[in-house]
Image (cartoon, coloured by chain):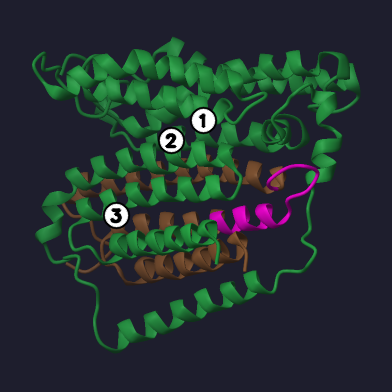
Amino acid sequence: MTLAMAFDIGLALLVVGVATWTIVAHNTFAAVVGFVAYGLLLALVWVRLAAPDVALTEAALGSGLTGGLLLGASTRLRRTETSEDAAELPAGALRLTAVGLCTLVAAGLSALVLLLPVPAATLAPQAMASIAATGLGNPVTAVLMAYRAIDTLLEVVVLLLALVGIWSLAPDRVWDSLPGPRHHADSEGFLTFIAQLLVPVGILVGIHIFWVGSDAPGGEFQGATILAAMWVLAMMAGLVDAPPVSRRWLRLVLVVGPAVFFAIGLAGFAMAGGFLAYPESHAKMLIVAIEMPVTLSIAAALALLVAGPPERAPGR
Amino acid sequence: MTDATVYGVCSAVLVGLGLFGLIMHPQPLRKILAFNLIGGGIFLLFGVVARRGAAAGLGGDPVPQALVITGLVVAFAATALTVALLLRLFEETGRATLRSDG
């Protein structure tokens, strides 16, 4: 057994251990902390699987933003933990049956993985064959922006739909107000200090990750997630307040990405004979022209998804 | 045995663990957490398939990798929506439970 293989087995065991902890932990807050660790370990796994783009997304979005969202929810729901629905798992025959069934599912999936056909199916040669036409150097970005651009367009729309769903959960009396609880800046506080230090650096890192994404690991989703995390951090530290959800500039920021994406997609009919087709001479320029507003829209949508539905009038 | 095999079995175990938490935990927030655990396992399965498809000088097939990135973003949006629904339920009833009785 080589050293790399020993590392892989150790990492896999660690991931399974942390995942078990998030299921069996009594305290929900502790379970969420376990989930954040689970996401970071998965990011390491993605690096081992030669997918640095996914590793960045997993660390920033799967672990960071999702963790922040769930930590906030578990703090709000802490009061319910001592009530009738304690974190106690059902015992006895029910538990045994569930363990048996879940083991069966895991065993079936393992068998499928072990019996996958050899040689493995792959689209890598096709993806690489057409990458030159896009002018991009990162094959994953090329797939996201050219080969499967329609998935990416619909995904940005899904983010907006989720946001509309969350906003429509606001009671009538607070509609047109600010999302989430108001956090007050504490000039002596640790969080405020960290936010003042980290937010400017984080914004630069986010833009950098977005920009290098055409040729190196990174891209609009990873960059936008970091930008969103910085906005969330500034809001949590009380440095800035969330905007009222009815602001026109906010709505514009949210829809400019998908709108430009859709417009350039339609222009593809005239320029290259198909929806979301790029003329070869201008492919990279058009892709970057889509990516910039899309990054802005995704960042705003992600941050507002974390902030939640509007719930208080301005100034409170 | 390759790294893809190790992580392939790992992803299967993660799906099993998450499924157990999803059906057994009485608290909705713990169910959401368990559901995300399943999601992590399924995405990892995609990663394993991508890794096995390494060709053309790449360490992995970029198509499943791009699908996972899309999937992660959609999973986050769905999680945010469920959490908002749960918090609204708590706000309305003072409880966060799926039980319909008293």
Query: What residue is drawn where x is 42% and y is 84%?
Result: A100
Q: Secondary structure at mark 1?
A: helix
Marks 1/2 in contact by CB < 8 Å: the verdict is yes
Q: Secondary structure at mark 3?
A: helix
Chain B is shown in which shade?
A: brown
> Does B50 appear in magenta?
yes
At label 2, counting other C-alpha atoms closer than 10 Å, the crowd grade (few under 14, some 14-19, many 20 or more) is many
Instruction: Give the residue type at disc 2.
Output: Ala
Point out residue A278 in the picture as x, y percentages from the top left corner.
82, 22
Query: What residue is drawn where x is 25% and y is 28%?
Result: A173
Instruction: Give the residue type at disc 1.
Output: Gln
Disc 3 with disc 2 on a shared chain: no
Residue farthest to the right, as pictured: A273
Q: Chain of mark 2?
A: A
Disc 1 versus disc 3: nearer the observer: 1
Q: Which residue position is annotated with label 2?
A: A60
Disc 1 with disc 3 on a shared chain: no
Task: Point out the stretch of residues depicted in magenta.
Answer: B44-60
Q: Which residue position is annotated with label 1?
A: A222
Q: Which residue position is annotated with label 3?
A: B29
Q: Chain of mark 3?
A: B
Q: Chain of mark 1?
A: A
Chain A is shown in which shade?
A: green
User: Relative to B74, is A165 on the left or the right?
Assistant: left
Query: What residue is drawn where x is 72% and y is 36%?
Result: A143
Q: Earlier in the sequence, mark 1 or mark 2?
A: 2
